[in-house]
Image (cartoon, rainbow, N blue to C red):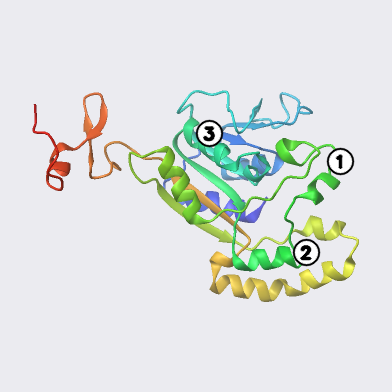
Amino acid sequence: MDTFYGRTLTALLERGILDTGMRVLVCCGGWRDREALLACGFTDVTISNLDDRMEADAFAPYAWSYQDAEQLGFADDSFDFAITHSGLHHCRSPHRGLLELYRVARRGLLVFEPRDSALVRLGVRLDFGQEYEVAAVAGSALTHGGVRNGPIPNFVYRWTEREIEKTLASWDPLGRPRLHYFYALRVPEQRLSWMKNRLAAVAVRGLVPLLRLFTAVAPRQANNFAFCAEKVQVPRDLHPWLEAGPDGPRPSRAWLAARYSNVPPTP
């Protein structure tokens, strides 16, 4: 099992944010997701992707569904939680993929993605990291592994915490989602094993102990992170300028009148 994946799931279970009985959707999913969720005891999981080579029972005991992460065929709040692991950067619009996860989840989402940092950008410039994910396509017979799981290598979109917060705030203006971040230095062992430039591969491996020490002190310089967003719950998480009304959230006349002279009186 992927240890970072497993540690993150375990931490969220211990905090009571996740529960193994939740109905879970995995987007851009695969065997890594199946193994991690099965090891943690999740029972009601649908793993989805754009891989037309899949059989219906490919991820048994879990269900499989052919789904486009940027346009999911599910109604709002169809699942308790939505998860994707290293999948959003394969979308043409990673932000749209993120918001689709948020839309179909009732309680929240969990996303694992590359993180944008000064150290990572330096690594890309030195060819220790990839700007476009060519290695995945090379390792998939030049037919899969790129944009929308096709043969064209995707740009590796890397996120920051602030970008996540702004994206979710734009989509859901009722309140602030409760966000939890987890960080990890993840060494691309498979890519290193495929590289013909063995000197570069050896150099990267030689730097790993130093990088682990550095990212232990400065975790936000790690090349990967996970973020969990608990969806806004009404009325618990409403902004102070909103209140719960009979037909849903509405502006709080009292809050606004205390701050602005142009608020009309109560009819």
The residue that appears at 73% across and 45% down in the rendered structure is: 154
N-terminal of the pair, mark 3 or mark 1, is 3
Q: CA distance from mark 3 to mark 2?
A: 33 Å
Viewer-proximal residue among 12 and 245 = 245
**Does 146 appear above or below 59?**
below
Taking the image as drawn, is residue 21 in sight? Answer: no
Kind of element beneath mark 3: helix
Percent coordinates x, y for residue 150 in the rendering: 77, 36
Q: Quadrant of residue 243?
A: top left
Mark 2 closeness class: few <14, some 14–19, many ≥20 residues within 10 Å: few
Q: CA distance from mark 2 to mark 1?
A: 21 Å
Reading the image, the residue beneath label 2 is 127
Mark 3 closeness class: few <14, some 14–19, many ≥20 residues within 10 Å: many
Q: Is residue 29 left or right of residue 266?
A: right
Kind of element beneath mark 1: loop
Say if mark 3 contacts mark 2, CB within 8 Å: no
Q: Is residue 45 left or right of residue 248?
A: right
Q: Quadrant of residue 204?
A: bottom right
Reading the image, the residue beneath label 1 is 142
Reading the image, the residue beneath label 3 is 100
Mark 3 vs mark 2: in front: 2
Q: CA distance from mark 3 to mark 1?
A: 28 Å
